[in-house]
Image (tube, helix red, strand yellow):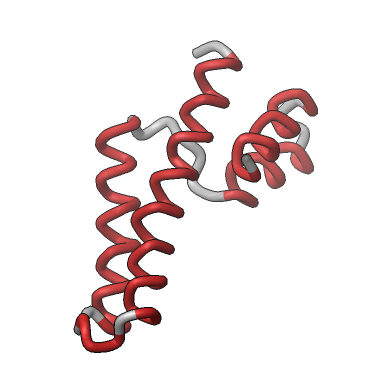
Amino acid sequence: MSLRNRLAAELMGTFWLVFGGCGSAVLAAAFPKLGIGFTGVALAFGLTVLTGAFGFGAPLAGGALAGFLFPLVAGESDETLAEGKAVAQVA
């Protein structure tokens, strides 16, 4: 998989997690009578990760630290990939 495709997948996966998970948390806080509460937010995060893994593919990074920082420190990744993933997750 090319670097461009990997970074695009990282960007889409991060967007999906923020959109689904954090969006449900914002709705739960802004509209307390909506009724999703802590359980609904937890389920939303879980379902967001599950649908992202199935929709975007399993080879995506598992998280910010596990995806680029730990392999970089262990010497299993190059700096270009780590910098690209960091930018993709912040964008």
| Residue found 39% across the figure and 72% down from its top | 25
Q: Seen in the image, is 73 located left or right of residue 11?
A: right
* Viewer-side residue, 3 vs 29: 29
In the picture as drawn, the residue positioned furthest to the top comes out as 2
The foreground one among 44 and 76 is: 44
Q: Position of residue 64 (x, y in %)?
A: 60, 49
Tell me what residue is drawn at x 28 percent, y 64 percent. 44
Vertical arrangement, residue 39 with respect to residue 85, above or below: below
Q: Position of residue 16 (x, y in %)?
A: 39, 45
Q: Is residue 42 above or below residue 47?
A: below
Left or right: 65, with 17 as reference point = right
Residue that extends furthest to the bottom in the rendered view of this protein: 33
Q: Quadrant of the C terminus?
A: top right
Picture residue at 34% right of the left edge, 62% below the top: 45
Residue 81 percent coordinates (x, y): 69, 26
Question: For residue 24, what is the image quadrant?
Answer: bottom left
Camera-side residue of 38 and 19? 19
User: How many numbered circles are shown?
Assistant: 0
In this picture, residue 78 sits left or right of residue 91:
right
Against 58, residue 22 (above or below) is below
